[in-house]
Image: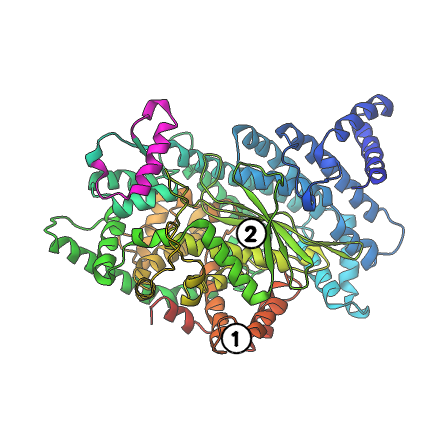
Amino acid sequence: MKKHLLFAIILCMTSAYANSQNASTSPVAAAFVEELLDNPFLQEWTTPFEVPPFDKIRNEHYLPAFEKAMQQHNLEIDAITNSEKAPDFENTMAAFDHSGKLLEKVSSVFFGINGANTSKELQDIARRLSPMLSKHNDDINLNPKLFERIKAIYGSRQNVKYDPQQLRLIEETYKDFIRGGAGLDSAGKSQLRELNKEISMLQLTFGQNLLAENNSFRLVIDKPADLAGLPKDLLATAAETANADSATKGKWVFTLQNPSVMPFLQFADNRSLREKIFTAYINRGNNDNSSDNKEIIKKLVLLREQKARLMGYENFASFTLENRMAKKPANVYDLLNQVWTPAIAMAKKERESLQQMITANGGNIVLEGWDWRYYSEKVRKARFDLDEEAVKPYFKLENVRDGIFYVANKLYGITFEEVPDAPTYYPGVKLYSCKDNDGSLLGVFYMDFHPRAGKRGGAWCGSFRSQSYEDGKRVPPVMTIVCNFSAPAADKPALLTADEVETFFHEFGHNLAGLFRNVKYQGIGGVPRDFVELPSQINEHWAFEPEVLKVYAKHYLTGEIIPKALVEKIVKSGKYGEGFKTTEYLAACYLDMDYHTSAEVSKGLDVIKFETASMDKIGLITQIPPRYRSTYFQHTMTGGYTAGYYSYIWAEVLDADAFQAFKETGNIFDQATAKKFRTDILEKGGSKDAMEMYLDFRGKKPSINPLLENRGLK
């Protein structure tokens, strides 16, 4: 931000602030200007590629920056609504789309850091912000003067010659306002405000409770005999975790973070300890303590249903899906049912084979949930002679990264380079630049790989700055890839599991969509939730292609390329366990949909009984819990994938079919197909209907058959 513009903003905001405080302008202005000038969010960023100056941003900067940003946003909205000129595209639509830049700037950084490296202080700030932001958003969505101007442009849109992106912005903005409550009467608007405020706070509380639960359990082992079967890398990490706390120094500590709990369940010979950590894992948020999420869920799903009915919909899923590719709940259930039938049948066959393994080894137990991964690993090793621990040395994190860069370069001609000395928010986080095939900058992105107490679970791709246009020029994005991969242990580098490799390729696919996006208006930058996973999931297809493995799968000690025989074992075993993986995922999809379509939520919901009934209805076997049980189902309960967890399988229909386009050429790196995928889908954002974009690329509607074949379900 240029200095003269900064002072102009300060003067406007100072006047607004002073008036709001009924105080004289001069003394307020002096203190206010001094505060603003000291706040990094109100200064020009001179960092490489204008990334956030993390070395200067302190927690105390956030709230003042949010307050000033909301004030500025209000001034921008007032300038639109108070205009004496008749509403047109530039003075209303474009002006509205361009408003709130400072608020977006502050929000992107705060919420990005709050997810990746939170603290009690940041969580307290988030709780203070929740009602403020809810009110601010509602003040805009429910602003009658603003809506009247937007409505006027929408109503006359056929009489004016707009380009496709302008027309799309008009239609999507109008739709957003209607869905935001602009068409409600005054009583309805008041009710919506209260609902949004409560929903926002409950979603935030759910996530904070889950983070507390993830960090509250530790399995402490002090007897070496109890470590039988566990890989050396895992033991080294557990010892380092234990030594970080004087109370457990010299012991081994296992946590509920995936790189710890999942291999423990997979390899630990001690069955009682597997049961202990498994039980802790599936009961997160269900321990009747201060972090219990059952009451949160009970209130949350009821409020969502009330909001849907206020907006004129039968249930919250119907309200949500109207704006997505699926359109209505029946279409989601139809897809789930098509995949569920073969998946549960395969899961039952897998259960039989695991029980046979137990019996054959002289076991006198009935298979339980805490046994599945353990015996599945033994069956995999016996059937395919594949030991995951023999594979990991070929998946050094840095090599996998280089393999991902190789795939992107070969498909799209883009190149990557680490940015030295860039400010980061945590040690070990690195920034990379991405240049197009003509040398121009597409964007930059951070990579943040390993677990820590302040990082929420899972993996995600986000941004500290979305792609936009300023003065007719493209502003490149600042993206982030955040994961919870196995960390380096003892004298070994970070070695990834096959699942982690796939996750890395997945998140980088999201990153590519963000880097390639090239739309003029922010209001049409996003895509429907059930389309957003297409770029990420199609990128997974290259991960274990033999041609790609030869590039990046090199032994971390010898540099030896992964042997052909081992590659063949990986390929042959690729579909093993799909019954379990597909079933646990689909079970969570059904649970999500049931919460947001069932009339039972308004009848004194008992969360655990509801979940049990939901799973009984589809015939889920007892040894497989849904991938996310209700009390730790962050995807749906915190708002990101509400009535939308099905999106991964919906998008898999698309990505499996889309990858066929490459295979049909006889070259998985066919550049003409890659260019078409880039221009028809990755660059487009939400500037066009999702199915239209897919049809532009593929020339036909997708078939479910490639998905079933990929998962070995056909």
In this picture, residue 336 sits left or right of residue 366: right
Q: Is residue 685 above or below residue 37?
A: below
Residue farthest right in this picture: 84
Query: Foreground residue, 488 or 134?
Result: 488
- Residue 332 in view, yes or no: no
In this picture, residue 405 sits left or right of residue 180: left
Residues shaded magenta: 226-251
Q: Residue type at mark 1: give it.
A: Lys
Query: Foreground residue, 610 or 513?
Result: 513
Query: Foreground residue, 491 or 634?
Result: 491
1 or 2: mark nearer the eye:
1
Question: In the picture, residue 26 is in which quadrant?
Answer: top right
Q: Residue type at mark 2: give it.
A: Ala
In this picture, residue 486 sits left or right of residue 481: left
| Whole-number angstrom distance, CA of label 1 to CA of label 2 | 31 Å
Q: Quadrant of the C terminus?
A: bottom left
* Nearest to N terminus: mark 1 or mark 2: 2
Question: Magenta span has 272?
Answer: no
- Residue 481 in view, yes or no: yes
* Residue at 16% over, 56% down: 357
Residue 558 x/y as whole percent: 37, 52
In the picture of the structure, the residue carrying the numbered disc 1 is 701
Q: For the residue labelled by badge 1, is the local secondary structure a helix, a strand or a loop?
A: loop
| Chief SS of the magenta region | helix
